[in-house]
Amino acid sequence: MEVKEILKHVDHTLLAQGATWEEIRQICDDAMHYGTASVCIPPSYVRQAKDYVGDRMAVCTVIGFPNGYMTTAAKEFEAKDALENGADEIDMVINIGWVKDQKFDLVEREIRTLKAAAGQKILKVIIETCLLTDEEKVELCHVVTCAGADYIKTSTGFSTGGATFDDVRLFAANVGPKVKIKAAGGISSLADAEEFLRLGADRLGTSRVVKIVKQPANKKSRGK
Protein backbone atom coordinates (compact mmCIF):
# COMPACT_ATOMS: atom_id res chain seq x y z
CA MET A 1 0.00 0.00 0.00
CA GLU A 2 1.31 3.46 -0.90
CA VAL A 3 2.38 5.58 2.07
CA LYS A 4 0.13 8.40 0.84
CA GLU A 5 -2.85 6.05 0.99
CA ILE A 6 -2.03 5.04 4.57
CA LEU A 7 -1.74 8.71 5.58
CA LYS A 8 -5.22 9.43 4.24
CA HIS A 9 -6.57 7.16 7.00
CA VAL A 10 -4.54 8.63 9.87
CA ASP A 11 -5.99 10.82 12.62
CA HIS A 12 -2.71 12.56 13.48
CA THR A 13 -2.95 12.61 17.25
CA LEU A 14 -1.58 14.58 20.19
CA LEU A 15 -3.48 14.13 23.46
CA ALA A 16 -0.68 14.35 26.03
CA GLN A 17 -1.63 16.21 29.19
CA GLY A 18 1.19 18.71 28.73
CA ALA A 19 0.60 19.43 25.06
CA THR A 20 1.35 23.07 24.18
CA TRP A 21 -0.04 25.20 21.38
CA GLU A 22 3.34 25.10 19.62
CA GLU A 23 3.15 21.29 19.57
CA ILE A 24 -0.47 21.35 18.42
CA ARG A 25 0.38 23.82 15.66
CA GLN A 26 3.19 21.53 14.51
CA ILE A 27 0.95 18.49 14.16
CA CYS A 28 -1.55 20.65 12.28
CA ASP A 29 1.21 21.67 9.89
CA ASP A 30 2.33 18.06 9.48
CA ALA A 31 -1.23 16.85 8.94
CA MET A 32 -1.84 19.41 6.21
CA HIS A 33 1.53 18.70 4.58
CA TYR A 34 1.14 14.91 4.56
CA GLY A 35 -2.60 14.78 3.89
CA THR A 36 -3.90 12.94 6.95
CA ALA A 37 -7.61 12.44 7.61
CA SER A 38 -7.64 14.76 10.63
CA VAL A 39 -5.77 16.07 13.63
CA CYS A 40 -7.00 14.68 16.96
CA ILE A 41 -6.33 17.14 19.77
CA PRO A 42 -7.53 18.18 23.25
CA PRO A 43 -10.81 20.13 23.40
CA SER A 44 -9.12 23.22 24.81
CA TYR A 45 -7.23 23.71 21.54
CA VAL A 46 -10.09 23.09 19.12
CA ARG A 47 -11.03 26.71 18.44
CA GLN A 48 -7.42 27.82 18.04
CA ALA A 49 -6.62 24.86 15.79
CA LYS A 50 -9.72 25.33 13.62
CA ASP A 51 -8.94 29.02 13.21
CA TYR A 52 -5.43 27.99 12.16
CA VAL A 53 -6.27 25.21 9.68
CA GLY A 54 -9.63 26.46 8.40
CA ASP A 55 -11.02 24.13 5.76
CA ARG A 56 -7.62 22.64 4.99
CA MET A 57 -7.84 19.95 7.69
CA ALA A 58 -10.53 18.27 9.79
CA VAL A 59 -10.23 18.83 13.53
CA CYS A 60 -11.14 15.90 15.80
CA THR A 61 -11.35 16.04 19.58
CA VAL A 62 -12.10 13.72 22.49
CA ILE A 63 -15.04 13.69 24.90
CA GLY A 64 -15.22 11.98 28.30
CA PHE A 65 -11.53 11.29 27.86
CA PRO A 66 -9.82 9.08 28.87
CA ASN A 67 -11.91 7.29 31.53
CA GLY A 68 -15.45 7.70 30.23
CA TYR A 69 -17.14 7.77 33.62
CA MET A 70 -18.53 11.32 33.43
CA THR A 71 -22.30 11.75 33.34
CA THR A 72 -24.04 11.76 29.99
CA ALA A 73 -25.01 15.39 30.58
CA ALA A 74 -21.36 16.33 31.07
CA LYS A 75 -20.33 14.52 27.90
CA GLU A 76 -23.16 16.14 25.96
CA PHE A 77 -22.03 19.58 27.14
CA GLU A 78 -18.41 18.80 26.21
CA ALA A 79 -19.47 17.64 22.76
CA LYS A 80 -21.67 20.67 22.07
CA ASP A 81 -18.93 23.01 23.27
CA ALA A 82 -16.36 21.32 21.02
CA LEU A 83 -18.69 21.50 18.02
CA GLU A 84 -19.39 25.19 18.65
CA ASN A 85 -15.63 25.74 18.75
CA GLY A 86 -15.28 24.18 15.30
CA ALA A 87 -14.70 20.45 15.84
CA ASP A 88 -15.44 18.36 12.76
CA GLU A 89 -15.25 14.98 14.50
CA ILE A 90 -15.92 13.74 18.04
CA ASP A 91 -14.29 10.69 19.67
CA MET A 92 -16.26 9.81 22.83
CA VAL A 93 -15.34 7.31 25.56
CA ILE A 94 -18.10 5.03 26.83
CA ASN A 95 -18.78 4.28 30.49
CA ILE A 96 -16.91 1.03 31.07
CA GLY A 97 -18.58 0.54 34.45
CA TRP A 98 -21.96 0.42 32.74
CA VAL A 99 -20.63 -2.30 30.47
CA LYS A 100 -19.40 -4.33 33.45
CA ASP A 101 -22.83 -3.87 35.07
CA GLN A 102 -24.48 -5.08 31.84
CA LYS A 103 -26.26 -1.73 31.46
CA PHE A 104 -25.95 -1.70 27.69
CA ASP A 105 -29.19 0.25 27.37
CA LEU A 106 -27.56 3.19 29.16
CA VAL A 107 -24.47 2.95 26.94
CA GLU A 108 -26.65 3.00 23.83
CA ARG A 109 -28.71 5.91 25.13
CA GLU A 110 -25.57 7.92 25.81
CA ILE A 111 -24.18 7.27 22.34
CA ARG A 112 -27.50 8.31 20.82
CA THR A 113 -27.40 11.53 22.85
CA LEU A 114 -23.96 12.44 21.58
CA LYS A 115 -24.83 11.50 18.01
CA ALA A 116 -27.85 13.78 18.23
CA ALA A 117 -25.52 16.56 19.38
CA ALA A 118 -23.04 15.83 16.59
CA GLY A 119 -25.66 15.74 13.84
CA GLN A 120 -23.91 15.36 10.49
CA LYS A 121 -20.47 15.53 12.12
CA ILE A 122 -18.62 12.26 12.64
CA LEU A 123 -18.99 10.47 15.99
CA LYS A 124 -16.50 7.76 16.95
CA VAL A 125 -17.11 5.59 20.01
CA ILE A 126 -14.09 4.45 22.05
CA ILE A 127 -14.84 1.21 23.88
CA GLU A 128 -11.35 0.58 25.41
CA THR A 129 -10.97 -3.02 24.29
CA CYS A 130 -8.12 -3.84 26.68
CA LEU A 131 -10.61 -3.67 29.59
CA LEU A 132 -13.27 -5.86 27.99
CA THR A 133 -14.03 -9.51 27.33
CA ASP A 134 -14.67 -10.65 23.78
CA GLU A 135 -18.33 -11.10 24.66
CA GLU A 136 -18.53 -7.48 25.84
CA LYS A 137 -16.79 -6.28 22.68
CA VAL A 138 -19.29 -8.14 20.48
CA GLU A 139 -22.23 -6.69 22.42
CA LEU A 140 -20.77 -3.22 22.06
CA CYS A 141 -20.44 -3.70 18.31
CA HIS A 142 -24.21 -4.17 18.29
CA VAL A 143 -24.82 -1.25 20.66
CA VAL A 144 -22.70 1.15 18.61
CA THR A 145 -24.46 0.02 15.45
CA CYS A 146 -27.94 0.44 16.91
CA ALA A 147 -27.07 3.84 18.38
CA GLY A 148 -26.20 5.23 14.95
CA ALA A 149 -22.56 6.14 15.57
CA ASP A 150 -20.23 6.48 12.61
CA TYR A 151 -17.23 4.59 14.01
CA ILE A 152 -16.29 2.13 16.71
CA LYS A 153 -12.80 2.77 18.07
CA THR A 154 -10.54 0.37 19.94
CA SER A 155 -8.71 2.45 22.50
CA THR A 156 -7.79 5.74 24.13
CA GLY A 157 -4.10 4.90 24.23
CA PHE A 158 -4.16 5.83 27.93
CA SER A 159 -5.16 2.48 29.44
CA THR A 160 -3.42 -0.89 29.71
CA GLY A 161 -3.28 -1.64 25.99
CA GLY A 162 -4.01 -0.35 22.52
CA ALA A 163 -5.30 -1.66 19.23
CA THR A 164 -4.80 -5.31 18.30
CA PHE A 165 -5.32 -7.12 15.02
CA ASP A 166 -7.69 -9.54 16.75
CA ASP A 167 -9.94 -6.73 17.95
CA VAL A 168 -10.17 -5.20 14.48
CA ARG A 169 -11.06 -8.62 13.07
CA LEU A 170 -13.73 -9.00 15.73
CA PHE A 171 -15.15 -5.54 14.99
CA ALA A 172 -15.23 -6.21 11.26
CA ALA A 173 -17.22 -9.40 11.86
CA ASN A 174 -19.78 -7.83 14.19
CA VAL A 175 -20.49 -4.17 13.42
CA GLY A 176 -23.24 -3.11 11.06
CA PRO A 177 -22.48 -2.15 7.46
CA LYS A 178 -22.68 1.59 8.15
CA VAL A 179 -20.22 1.54 11.07
CA LYS A 180 -16.55 2.07 10.31
CA ILE A 181 -13.60 1.03 12.45
CA LYS A 182 -10.84 3.10 14.02
CA ALA A 183 -7.77 1.39 15.46
CA ALA A 184 -5.84 3.48 17.98
CA GLY A 185 -3.11 3.05 20.53
CA GLY A 186 0.32 1.54 19.96
CA ILE A 187 0.39 1.68 16.16
CA SER A 188 4.14 2.09 15.73
CA SER A 189 5.06 1.04 12.19
CA LEU A 190 3.88 1.42 8.61
CA ALA A 191 3.59 -2.36 8.38
CA ASP A 192 1.20 -2.44 11.34
CA ALA A 193 -0.77 0.49 9.96
CA GLU A 194 -1.17 -1.27 6.63
CA GLU A 195 -2.26 -4.50 8.32
CA PHE A 196 -4.92 -2.71 10.40
CA LEU A 197 -6.31 -1.20 7.21
CA ARG A 198 -6.25 -4.57 5.44
CA LEU A 199 -8.20 -6.13 8.31
CA GLY A 200 -10.97 -3.55 8.03
CA ALA A 201 -9.96 -0.38 9.87
CA ASP A 202 -10.84 2.86 8.10
CA ARG A 203 -9.04 5.22 10.51
CA LEU A 204 -5.84 4.94 12.52
CA GLY A 205 -5.29 7.01 15.65
CA THR A 206 -1.54 7.55 15.90
CA SER A 207 1.22 10.13 15.98
CA ARG A 208 3.98 7.74 14.99
CA VAL A 209 3.07 7.15 11.34
CA VAL A 210 3.71 10.77 10.38
CA LYS A 211 6.91 10.78 12.45
CA ILE A 212 8.12 7.70 10.57
CA VAL A 213 7.36 9.33 7.21
CA LYS A 214 9.25 12.46 8.30
CA GLN A 215 12.39 10.56 9.33
CA PRO A 216 14.11 10.44 5.93
CA ALA A 217 13.75 14.22 5.59
CA ASN A 218 15.11 14.72 9.12
CA LYS A 219 18.12 12.49 8.44
CA LYS A 220 18.83 14.26 5.16
CA SER A 221 18.66 17.62 6.91
CA ARG A 222 21.12 16.51 9.61
CA GLY A 223 23.53 15.26 6.95
CA LYS A 224 23.87 18.64 5.27
Image (tube, rainbow, N blue to C red):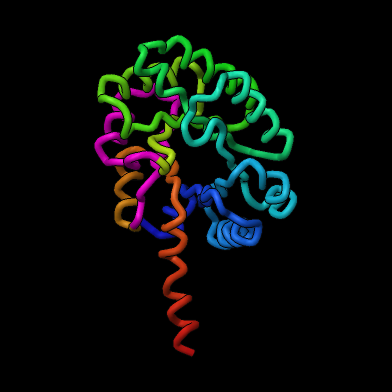
Q: Residue at x 26, y 25 (%)?
A: 133
Quadrant, the N terminus: bottom left
Answer left or right for 127 relative to 136. Answer: right
Q: Nearer the viewer, residue 112 or 155?
A: 155
Please provide the residue range marked out in magenta: 159-188
The residue depicted at 37 percent of the width and 22 percent of the height is 141
Reply above or below: 96 against 27: above
Q: Quadrant of residue 171?
A: top left
Viewer-nearest residue: 23 or 205: 23
Q: Residue furthest bottom?
A: 224
**Residue shown at 56% from the left, 53% from the top:** 18
Q: Quadrant of residue 88?
A: top right
Residue 41 in the magenta stretch? The answer is no
Percent x, y of residue 209: 42, 58
Picture layout, residue 29 above or below residue 196: below
Residue 43 placement, left or right of 218: right
Q: Which residue is located at x 42 percent, y 42 percent?
A: 158
In the rendered image, residue 127, in percent from the top left (x then y), is placed at: 41, 29
The image position of residue 22, as x and y in percent, is 64, 61
Percent position of residue 175, x then y: 37, 24
